[in-house]
Image: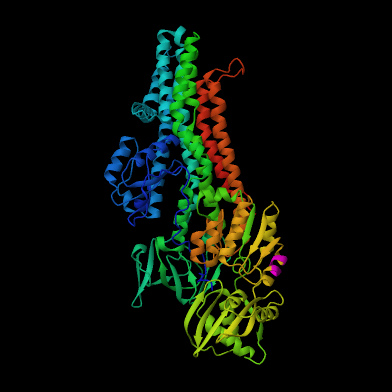
């Protein structure tokens, strides 16, 4: 029957999903299939705008052995697949030549916490640098503006303005001109050209004010451009730092040390030194350092950080607990099963990090535009200056050209989608739902059909035996139940566990069995006291050659009241049937009603008996249901719905759900499901609670809205303001943007995008 199920969510070995849009794929198939290929994420320093990400990707693309490179400006990271022949020193040199940095040892496989720490340190350094330089620029900016009021001579404002441009904003200026000389201009190039042009225009204004304009007005523009940019970058960095709060808080939950029990003594050791199988002591009130099985003791553990469940869970010997959980008042001795990256917390953190670094389809156009944005702006600025010079207005030529350079903002394009995805993935983890990648979240917002498995998904997965129907003249009820339990004692499938539990409750002696063999989706067999016993579904019984009439008669009796019938065969002859009832999960009807309300269509596809499936569908208000479906038949139903134009989400938890989860537009795995189901799914519920589904969908819908607003602003801002900045529309629109105002607008553009994304942290999902 179905494979083994864990007690909780273990997102093990989630393979990389379909290639993220916009990725660079240069590797031949033979490289991609070699076991030496590694998936690596490295922090990249020096990225200050969306066009920088394109440059880093171009450098990576040229490296032998690197493929499928994806660079995220929002997180300051690059992800790629690399062979063993990648030369880290050569890669670092090429990145440095392009103006970017690669921390030493990045290709050695940093741990998640270390990788995040390096990225955070780089972001913090840039934020502090922008803040210090903005503070340095502020008093000199004030002096430049009020030099006349202080009785200083005309033109003296250029001195403090020069300190602002060439000292406070000096690194930005020199980076911009250096990248311009390399024919790889970026945002710094635009700002540097704009502020330097304004300052030199002020200097020229002392000599030829008639042709260039007043020196003071140009000096004021030269001051405000870098001041606004530096202040804007500081604000943006602060806002972007807030997008990663969920991942940082998750990683901070695991203690750095653990108390290992050896020969009856406790010894505190670094967490990295703990090995699976060792006993770990957890005292009252401490965080649990490892995944493990309770060996001794009992307590209540708070796993809200993992599952979103606020009520502590009582645990005793034999129960599983997870790293990061808060121990209650009891003392526990644990047998370690997962440490660090191999713990549930570590895997969730890795999945969250990958989701936050993935690129959804909506970002493809923005990335392409951002990659060519700066060169296009330079051309527009040059054309603007030339046009006004030909019109005979040299003052307007300088003013409009500087405005074009300063008002353009590719950063908003680069931040529009990634910041929303980062915040949404973190919010989801906090709510008890995990999104595997950005594409899954975007597709989920388009879903119109949601298909469910039955057992363990909509039902509690703890069926109980309600009817026992032996064939007349054959075994007694107790004999039939004991025979079935002897086979199912080897199975962890829910129906099997229910049969074994029923036999134990009756105090029956369960005979030993041998040669157990599971038949996925149909049944299981074993030898019991020398007798061949098979137990399975009505479909499986028919496939074994039993007469349809005999099968139907047993099924009819066992299935009364919505039970799931299971048939028992002894030495090739049917000997009876069992009826098991698995009640719907608490609150599932309310959750499904919440999905139907916005227009989603629900379907129930199950391998269980048709009678049980129909009864559950009627109880839960599901409009379409079908039972006795093999895994391949679920796939057929799914493909048929997709062929009709539906976007389908599949919700399941078992081994036989994995094909449908993988083939669905979005697969959603239940928290207690089999690992193979979790690997095939695009999203997962961190606990066995369908009431989390409406939250997942609302998160997807709100994220889609946020991304659309961000992209509309990023594109609309540039498309609307750039033509005005050139002055070409002055005859149509009585609107003129001076360079000083342009600098302020540009600085706030990226901040608005990030701030709008941060609203997802507090969006209502209930």
**Residue at 27% across, 46% down:** 87
How far across and down, in percent of the image, does residue 383 sit? Answer: 47, 18
The colour scheme applied to this rendered structure is rainbow
Residue 444 is inside the magenta segment = no
Q: Which portion, as a residue range, is magenta?
A: 614-618
How far across and down, in percent of the image, does residue 127 sit? Answer: 43, 39
Residue 617 is inside the magenta segment = yes
How far across and down, in percent of the image, does residue 223 sit? Answer: 45, 23
Quarter of the image for the C terminus: give it. bottom right
Residue closer to the observer: 186 or 1: 1
Our reading of the magenta stretch's main secondary structure is helix
Query: Does the image show residue 138?
Result: no
Relative to 325, does residue 711 appear above or below in the rendering? above
Residue closer to the observer: 699 or 515: 515
Furthest residue toward bottom: 473
How far across and down, in percent of the image, does residue 458 sit? Answer: 63, 66
Query: Does the image show residue 82?
Result: yes
Left or right placement of residue 504 versus residue 11 in this view: right
How many numbered circles does the render carry?
Answer: 0
Residue closer to the observer: 126 or 10: 10
Quarter of the image for the N terminus: give it. bottom right
Relative to 512, does residue 25 appear above or below in the rendering? above
Relative to 686, does residue 123 appear above or below in the rendering? above
Left or right placement of residue 588 versus residue 81 in this view: right
Residue closer to the observer: 703 or 681: 681
**Residue at 40% across, 14% down:** 203
**Residue at 72% across, 76% down:** 561
């Amino acid at each position: 029957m179905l494979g083994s199920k864990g007690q909780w969510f273990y997102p093990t070995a989630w393979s990389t999903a379909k290639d993220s849009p916009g990725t660079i794929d240069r590797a031949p198939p033979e490289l991609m299939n070699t076991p030496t290929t590694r998936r690596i994420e490295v922090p990249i320093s020096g990225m200050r705008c969306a066009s920088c990400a394109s440059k880093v990707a171009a450098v990576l693309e040229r490296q032998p052995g690197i493929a499928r490179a994806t660079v995220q400006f929002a997180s300051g990271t690059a992800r790629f697949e690399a062979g063993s022949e990648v030369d880290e020193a050569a890669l670092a040199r090429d990145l440095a030549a392009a103006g970017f940095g690669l921390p030493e040892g990045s290709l050695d496989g940093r741990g998640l916490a270390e990788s995040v720490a390096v990225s955070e340190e780089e972001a913090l350094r840039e934020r502090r640098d922008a803040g210090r330089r903005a503070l340095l620029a502020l008093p000199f900016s004030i002096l430049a503006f009020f030099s006349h009021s202080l009785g200083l001579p005309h033109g003296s404002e250029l001195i403090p303005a020069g300190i602002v441009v060439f000292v406070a904003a000096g690194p930005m200026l020199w980076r911009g001109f250096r990248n311009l000389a390399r024919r790889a201009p970026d945002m710094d190039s635009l700002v540097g050209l704009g502020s330097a042009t304004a300052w030199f225009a002020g200097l020229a204004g002392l000599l030829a004010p008639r042709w260039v304009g007043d020196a003071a007005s140009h000096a004021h523009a030269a001051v405000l451009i870098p001041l606004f940019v530096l202040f804007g970058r500081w604000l943006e960095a602060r806002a972007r730092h807030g997008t990663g709060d969920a991942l940082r808080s998750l990683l901070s939950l695991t203690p750095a040390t653990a108390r290992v029990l050896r020969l009856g003594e406790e010894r505190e050791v670094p967490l990295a030194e703990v090995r699976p199988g060792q006993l770990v002591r957890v005292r009252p009130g401490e965080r649990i350092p490892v995944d493990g099985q309770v060996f001794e003791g009992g307590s209540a553990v708070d796993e809200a950080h993992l599952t979103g469940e606020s009520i502590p869970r009582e645990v005793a010997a034999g129960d599983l607990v997870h790293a990061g959980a808060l121990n209650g008042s009891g003392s526990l001795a644990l047998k370690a099963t997962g440490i660090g990256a191999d713990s549930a917390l570590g895997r969730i953190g890795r999945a969250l990090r990958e989701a936050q670094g993935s690129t959804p389809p909506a970002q493809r156009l923005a990335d392409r535009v951002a990659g060519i944005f700066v060169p296009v702006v330079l051309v527009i600025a040059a054309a603007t200056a030339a046009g006004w010079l030909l019109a005979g207005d040299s003052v307007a030529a300088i003013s409009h050209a500087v405005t074009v350079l300063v008002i353009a903002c590719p950063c908003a394009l680069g931040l529009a989608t990634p910041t929303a995805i980062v915040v949404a993935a973190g919010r989801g983890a906090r709510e008890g739902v995990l999104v595997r990648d950005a594409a899954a979240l975007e597709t989920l917002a388009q879903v119109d059909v949601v298909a469910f498995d039955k057992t363990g998904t909509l039902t509690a997965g703890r069926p109980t035996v309600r009817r026992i129907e032996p064939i007349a003249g054959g075994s007694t009820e107790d004999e039939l139940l004991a025979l079935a339990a002897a086979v199912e004692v080897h199975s962890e499938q829910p129906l099997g566990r229910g049969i074994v539990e029923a036999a134990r409750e009756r105090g029956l002696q369960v005979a030993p069995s041998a040669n157990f063999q599971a038949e996925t989706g149909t049944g299981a067999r074993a030898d019991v006291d020398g007798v061949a016993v098979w137990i399975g579904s009505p479909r499986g019984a028919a496939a074994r050659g039993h007469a349809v009439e005999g099968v139907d008669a047993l099924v009819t009796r066992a299935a009364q009241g919505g039970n799931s019938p299971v048939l028992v065969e002894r030495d090739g002859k049917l000997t009876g049937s069992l009826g098991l009832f698995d009640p719907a999960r608490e609150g599932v009807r309310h959750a499904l009603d919440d999905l139907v309300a916005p227009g989603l269509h629900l379907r129930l596809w199950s391998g269980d008996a048709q009678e049980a499936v129909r009864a559950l569908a009627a109880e839960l208000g599901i409009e379409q249901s079908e039972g006795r479906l093999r895994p391949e038949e679920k796939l057929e139903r799914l493909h048929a719905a997709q062929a009709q134009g539906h976007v389908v989400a599949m919700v399941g938890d078992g081994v036989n759900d994995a094909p449908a989860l993988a083939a669905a537009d979005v697969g959603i795995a239940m928290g207690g499901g089999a690992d193979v189901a979790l690997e095939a799914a695009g999203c997962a519920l961190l606990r066995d609670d369908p009431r989390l589904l409406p939250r997942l969908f609302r998160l997807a819908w709100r994220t889609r809205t946020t991304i659309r607003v961000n992209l509309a602003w990023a594109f609309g801002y540039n498309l609307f303001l750039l033509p005005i900045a050139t002055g070409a529309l002055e005859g149509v629109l009585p609107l003129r943007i001076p360079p000083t105002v342009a600098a302020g607008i540009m600085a706030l553009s990226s901040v608005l995008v990030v701030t709008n994304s941060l609203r997802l942290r507090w969006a209502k999902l209930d």
